[in-house]
Image (cartoon, helix red, strand yellow):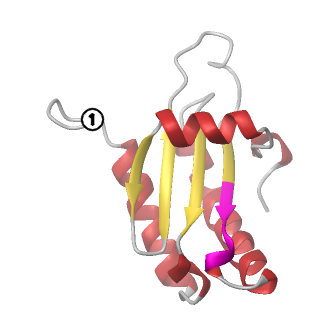
Amino acid sequence: MLPSGNRMRRRDDFTLAVRRGRRAGRPTVVVHLLHRDEAPAADAPPLVGFIVARTVGNAVVRNTARRRLRHLTRPHLDRLPAGSLLVVRANPRAGKARPDELAADLESALDRLLRPASKGRR
């Protein structure tokens, strides 16, 4: 389970991360990461939120996908910059994906976002 202090709850945080953050897409997930450069947020813990739409499946499938993603994200919390916002959006394939496939896609997307940005790409 994800610690309570790391859960994103405010709609404004979700919107900000999705609209202004860097994005990395994989077959089962799309990950949005926004680094906060503001001084007050520098000592805040990273916040993580999940978006699992109805296209993923019925309520049971969506909740299972959300629980899996929460479980898979927890080991990566220490890699996230302090005060950053991370949104993990499940694609429709996430509902039927094997746990190892979901883990590989999430890790691949996070690796891409946490690499230093090259000059020609954002």
Q: Is residue 37 left or right of residue 41?
A: left
In the image, is residue 93 above or below residue 48?
below
Q: Which residues are magenta?
A: 50-55
Residue 6 percent coordinates (x, y): 75, 43
Asked which quadrant contains residue 122, the reply is top left
Outermost residue, top side: 39
* Residue kind at label 1, given as amino acid type: Ala
In the image, is residue 96 above or below residue 1?
below
In the image, is residue 57 above or below residue 80?
below
Residue 55 percent coordinates (x, y): 62, 77
State yes or no: residue 32 in magenta: no
Residue named by callout 1: 117
Q: Residue at x 70, y 63 (%)?
A: 70
Asked which quadrant contains residue 47, the reply is top right
Q: Is residue 7 left or right of residue 26?
A: right
**Quadrant for the N terminus in the image:** bottom right
